[in-house]
Image (cartoon, grey):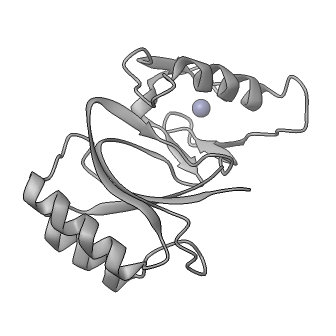
Amino acid sequence: MSDDVLSLIPIDQEFVPSSAAREKAAALLQEMLPDGEMCEAKVYDQLHFIDQGENCEAVLCPSCGRRFEIDYFTENDRGLTWWLEMSEAIAKDGSIKDVQTTTMPCCGAGLPFTSLEFDWPAGFAHFALSIWNSNVADGLLTVAQLGMLEEVLGCKLKQIRAHY
Ligand SMILES: [Zn+2]
């Protein structure tokens, strides 16, 4: 058994929508994706890493501009070693309060972990709206659906697909 999770998070890492907006958005998302399970809107006190599960293929370094692949099949691959260390530093519940800066394997720059971009996308948030196993073709909402949720929540959203 594997699971696919779609999470929607504000582009602004600090933004938390009102509880009324969160409730309305969760109901709307469930209506858009009727097959989906465990649809919920969560608020986190600490900034959380909203991960992409097994879908992390590469990391984009904002310092040198390189995209380094995470090669899961090569032992001692530099990207993989870095990624495993990061994964361990992130709390089991996704909180990243213990992860401040990281040394990039590509260029050695010390960067805030929250400044990194991932492929597939992942992100950092105090709020996430998630739904499990929605069975939509490519796992993502359409632009129109996303726009409706952005209007309800009052913020621009980013879609994150995780596979476990
Ligand atoms: Zn770099």
User: In the rendered image, which quarter contains the N terminus?
Assistant: bottom right
Above or below 14: residue 22: below
Q: In which quarter of the image is residue 138?
A: bottom right
Q: Name the residue: 43% across, 79% down.
A: 34
117 shown above or below 37: above
Q: Give the quarter the ligand 1 occupies.
A: top right
User: What percent of the width, then of the height, locates residue 98?
Assistant: 42, 14
Please report the residue visible at 47 percent of the width from the left and 70 percent of the height from the top: 36
Please report the residue visible at 11 percent of the width from the left and 52 percent of the height from the top: 19
Q: Tell me: 110 left or right of 41.
A: right
Q: Is residue 127 left or right of residue 107?
A: left
**Which quadrant holds residue 31?**
bottom left
Q: Which of 98 and 65 is in front in this view?
A: 98
For image coordinates 55% across by 38% down, the residue present is: 61
Q: In this view, does 20 lie above or below 128?
A: below
Pinpoint residue 128: horizontal percent, then vertical percent: 33, 50
In the visual, does 11 lie left or right of 141?
Answer: left
